Amino acid sequence: LIGGSACSCPSGEIWDWTEHFNNGSCKPCQPGTYNNDQVTFCQICPTGSTSIFGSDHCLCNAGMFWNKTHCDSCAEGSDSPQGALQCLICPSGSTSNKERKLCSCLWEIVEWVRQWGRFLQSSFT
């Protein structure tokens, strides 16, 4: 029992007395909510994130990661796919885009800037 009123449940579930008046049971958190054992109720995922049925964390957008209670942005030089629990450092010779959604080789970025510069130069001459 937790505080004499609820039993312990696995992550992603909460204790619920409503179905059985004398014998409660663990119920999974609904999509859009989570429970990571820090509270006795399912918490609503922050704006811009979601969760699946019975989840212990929320799924953040690409370029972000779940930091136990909220979504944090990946640092420069790292990226993450949607739903990541951590950011991954970009491989040597690459860097992340502004949104931190993917890493690109530095030579590709330099070539793109060079091509864009040629386009701009030819457009105004």
Image (tube, rainbow, N blue to C red):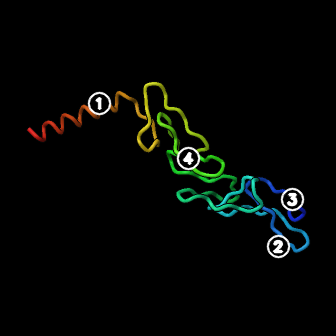
Q: Residue at 13% across / 37% down in the picture?
A: 122
Tell us which disc is closer to us: 2 or 4.
4
Label 1 – label 3 distance at C-alpha = 60 Å
Name the quadrant containing residue 65: top right
User: How many marks are shown on the rendered structure?
Assistant: 4
Mark earlier in primary sequence (2, 4): 2
Decide: marks 1, 3 in contact (CB < 8 A)? Answer: no
Mark earlier in primary sequence (2, 1): 2
| Residue hosting label 3 | 2
Q: Residues within 10 Å of mark 3 (few under 14, many from 20)?
A: few
Q: Percent x, y for residue 112?
A: 29, 34
Q: Which amino acid type is marked by label 4?
A: Asp
| Residue hosting label 2 | 19
Label 4 – label 3 distance at C-alpha = 31 Å
| Residue hosting label 1 | 111
Instruction: Tell me the SS state at disc 2.
Output: loop
Q: Which amino acid type is marked by label 1?
A: Glu
Q: Which amino acid type is marked by label 3?
A: Ile
